[in-house]
Image (cartoon, rainbow, N blue to C red):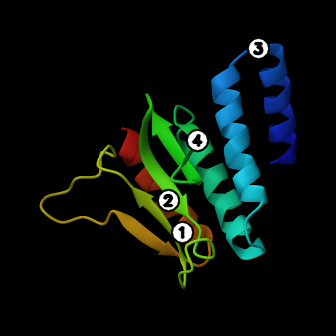
Amino acid sequence: MKERAAELEKEKTRGRGNKKAAEELDVLAKIEGMDPTDRALAERIHAIVTTTAPDLAPKLWYGQPAYALKGKVVCFFRSGHDDKERYSTFGFTPNANLDDGGFWPSSYAVSSVDAQAEKTIATLVARAVG
């Protein structure tokens, strides 16, 4: 993540992708400043989302990491520590293409990201932007 932040800083100073680079830098800085447990979760989720759906643009949304398509937030991470909650969450907005009948989850509690959780997150993100 530090290497990516350095790349973005170079892009920002060269004038290319100025806003996009600045917004991703803001997200990386927010993640870096999180409580260590939440930071580890946010780093994994950031990597999964940006790898699975490179068209999603990282940006801060209500002060937390989020990922937008054409300016509209599709998914987001909420730090449990920052929110003074028992666990962090990864959620989706109505802009995500996850509607499935009359009942579907819009947010998930996250206390760890193992291989199964990683697969689930990647699948949901792919569906959300599909």
Q: Give the distance between the C-alpha atoms of the residues marked 1 and 4, in whole angstroms.
A: 23 Å
Q: Are marks 3 and 2 in contact (CB under 8 Å)?
A: no
Q: Give the distance between the C-alpha atoms of the residues marked 2 and 4, in whole angstroms.
A: 18 Å
Q: Which mark is residue 14?
A: none
Among the two numbered marks 3 and 2 on one chain, the one whose residue lies closer to the N terminus: 3
* Left or right: 69, with 96 as reference point: right
Among the two numbered marks 2 and 4 on one chain, the one whose residue lies closer to the N terminus: 4
Q: Are marks 1 and 2 in contact (CB under 8 Å)?
A: yes
Among the two numbered marks 1 and 4 on one chain, the one whose residue lies closer to the N terminus: 4
Among the two numbered marks 1 and 3 on one chain, the one whose residue lies closer to the N terminus: 3
Q: Quadrant of residue 41?
A: bottom right
Q: Give the distance between the C-alpha atoms of the residues marked 1 and 3, in whole angstroms.
A: 37 Å
Q: Quadrant of the C terminus?
A: top left
Which of 33 and 95 lies nearest the eye of the viewer? Answer: 33
The picture places residue 23, in percent across and down from the top left corner, at 65, 36
Residue drawn at (83%, 30%) of the image: 9
Of the residues tagged 1 and 3, which is closer to the observer?
Answer: 3
Q: Residue at label 4?
A: 59
Give the answer, above or below, for where 120 lies relative to 11: below
Q: Residue at label 2?
A: 121
* Left or right: 3, with 20 as reference point: right
- Going by the numbered disc 3, the residue's amino acid type is Gly
The picture places residue 33, in percent across and down from the top left corner, at 77, 61
Q: Residue at label 3?
A: 15
Q: Residue at label 1?
A: 117
Residue drawn at (87%, 36%) of the image: 6
Q: Quadrant of residue 114?
A: bottom right
> What is the secondary structure assignment of the residue under circle 1?
helix
